[in-house]
Amino acid sequence: MDQFSKYIDPEFIFNEAPIGFVSFKPDGEIIKANCTFYSFFDKTERELSSANFLKLLTKGSALYFQMVLNPLLNLREYTNEISLSFSTPTENFDALFNAKAYKDEHGKVIVVNAYLLKIIDRKKYEAELLLAKRMAEDSLNSAKKIIDDNNEQFMKIALNQSHMIRRPMANMLGLISILKDIQISEDGADLIRLLETSAEELDTQIKEIVSQTQLPL
């Protein structure tokens, strides 16, 4: 049991968790945070000991927090998977903000416990997925134009470039498969399902077009 005691110690789990934990007052003053949270900003606990949570946000997210999230925390005392942007000396990053507010006996919020989950990789995959979708749609429109023009020269071009019509679609379907293995919000899951349906419809149309022109897949 001794060999495990270090790793199941509450303080160790708190500091080594792969998500950033932070507790702050309603005015943003940070009370306590874990090592992961500090690492997001390339700072030490001493450097951020007197920091203000709101000042770590970009201007847009800070305004959104004050106008929307503060009233929400006062009203229902929690928020789930709110995307916020944070500023660091080298770059900005996005994170999902989940929080629970605690009130005193007078019903006034005295502390907010929150955790942050960086979503850089997910945003990158989603951007690549949307780009692949646009490329597939462009390729489909080009294929339709080739058929409508019924021009032998265009048909030869289509024959030579048929693999380019399918490549963006294959990329998109591959990205969808990757995204399915990533834990994301319900809204993100809905987006993936929508894009998957669109991808399958586009793939069917491309196959029909290529079949009509007797182009090899």
Image (tube, rainbow, N blue to C red):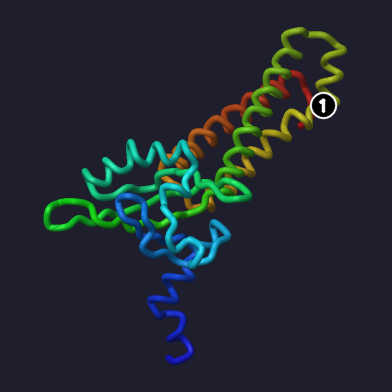
Q: Quadrant of residue 1?
A: bottom left
Q: Is residue 155 left or right of residue 47?
A: right
Q: What x and y, as percent, mark residue 166?
A: 72, 32
Where the C terminus falls, by quadrant? top right
Q: Position of residue 87 (x, y in %)?
A: 53, 47
Identified at 57% across, 48% down, the residue is 120
Count of numbered circles in the view: 1
- Indicate left or right for 120 with 84 as reference: right
Residue topped by disc 1? 161
Seen in the picture, residue 35 relative to 81 is either above or below; the reply is below
Q: Nearer the viewer, residue 207 or 181?
A: 181
Task: Give, as a three-letter code, the residue at label 1.
Answer: Gln
Nearer to the camera, 112 or 202: 112
The structure residue drawn at horizontal position 52% and vertical position 49%, both measured from the top left corner, is 119
Q: Position of residue 124 (x, y in %)?
A: 61, 44
Q: Residue at x 15, y 51 (%)?
A: 107
Q: Residue furthest front?
A: 50
Q: Quadrant of residue 141?
A: top right
| Residue closer to the observer: 37 or 43 | 43
Q: In this orientation, which residue lies closer to the viewer: 215 or 83?
A: 83
Left or right: 110 in relation to 142 = left
Task: Classify residue 117 as left or right of residue 66.
Answer: right
- 50 versus 133 height, above or below: below
Q: Horizontal and vertical percent for residue 93?
A: 55, 47
Q: Hey, which residue is sitting farthest left in the picture?
A: 106
How many residues crowd mark 1 within 10 Å: few (<14), some (14–19), many (20+)?
few
Secondary structure beneath dot 1 equals: loop
State whether residue 63 is above or below residue 12.
above
